[in-house]
Amino acid sequence: MTRTTPPRPLDVEVLFPELAGHRGTTTRLHPRPGSPDVSTSSVGGPMLWPADEPWPECGEAHARGYGRRPADIHRWRRIVSSAWAREQDPGPTDEERELLAELHLEHRIPGLTEMDPLPLIALAQLYRRDVPDLPPGPDGCDLLQVFWCPFDAHGPGRYDLELHLRWRRSWEVGEVLAEPPQPQVVGFDGFVPEPCVLHPEQVVTHPFAGLLPESLCARIDAWEEALEEEAEQSADDAAEPIGYQYDLSIPPGWRVGGFASWHVTDPSPMNCRACRTPMDLLLTIDSSEWDGGSGSWKPLEDRDLPTHRYATPTGVVVGRFGELNIFVCPTDPRHPHRWSIQ
């Protein structure tokens, strides 16, 4: 099934014609649970990975022998989803609760040292033929594969992510690795994605307000303040005022290209550390496809679905239910990427 973004509540370029000069596009990926294969773009699906090529591993020293088992996480999610989908007496039974408690236990792997091989988790793979805003890869590569370490124990503060991007030419892959290695345990459930098929949709987007020219940003702020005052005086308490950030500029959810949101921190320059070129947003990994503040972006096909059960199809959680923006150098995609959590 395709996914269709509803028309915006109003045409923001009519209100602020200058925004036409800042217009861009982004491809909403719309991941939904399914059974992808190696030939399709996916989140949490099997990778088109050569059988004779080493699987990526985390090379940093950190604890990696204590956590939940990935298979237990998947099974826990399936049981919870099925339990709440029942029409009669929805919710886990007493027997299911006992099983869920068992599946939620953490386990210790004896003898595993801080430098033992730790396979990275396959997070997503994206074919250019499926994703209009996916930039060209180096040397004609048409496939981007994204991996991460299942422990946030990296960097100076030991709380950072470890991301690995792999570009490849899909037509060069011969025999595919049938059973990729998996970590025995993970440090956080949110690192384990559920297999999802994608329904890419290209939509118009506009920059984060704080990155627009100062005079234009001030006019948008004044317009929003006026709408909020009107809403406070309105008799319709249920009416939510339209906002540039949540309704008219940057869509929520997993997406490729477009503009990064800086709604948690102030905008930060993202320049390539190799050549100092301003970097482009490659991929946004979001903890949810929509929430109470961004419901106007909910696809038409999903408009009758409640937020609390259906807005988190991938099972991936970034930070405290935020989003991860990954940036790449437009001059040379082989230069080191950068990222920001919002």
Image: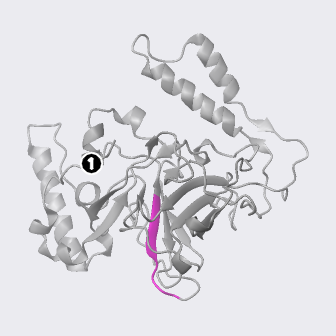
* Residue 287 part of the magenta segment: no
Residue occupying image coordinates x 70% and y 57%: 153
Residue at the limit of the structure toward the bottom, as seen here: 275
The image quarter in which residue 237 lies: top left
In this picture, which residue range is highlighted in magenta?
276-284
- Please provide percent x and percent y for residue 30: 39, 49
Label total for image: 1
| Quadrant location of the N terminus in the rendered image | top left
Residue occupying image coordinates x 76% and y 43%: 184
Answer with left or right where residue 293 lies relative to residue 280.
left
- Please provide percent x and percent y for residue 342: 46, 59
* Residue 280 part of the magenta segment: yes
Query: In what element is the residue under mark 1?
Result: loop
Q: Residues within 10 Å of mark 1 (few under 14, many from 20)?
A: some
Answer with left or right where residue 128 lies relative to residue 166.
left
Residue 89 position (above or below residue 341)? above
Mark 1 sits on what residue? 4
- Please provide percent x and percent y for residue 130: 41, 59
Answer with left or right where residue 102 lies relative to residue 210.
right
The image quarter in which residue 234 lies: top left
The image quarter in which residue 202 lies: bottom left
Residue occupying image coordinates x 69% and y 62%: 154
In front of the other: 308 or 171? 171
Q: Amino acid at mark 1?
A: Thr
- Please provide percent x and percent y for residue 284: 45, 60
Answer with left or right where residue 295 lies relative to residue 71.
left
Residue 195 position (above or below residue 97)? below
Q: How is the image coloured?
A: one colour
Residue 210 position (above or below residue 174)? below
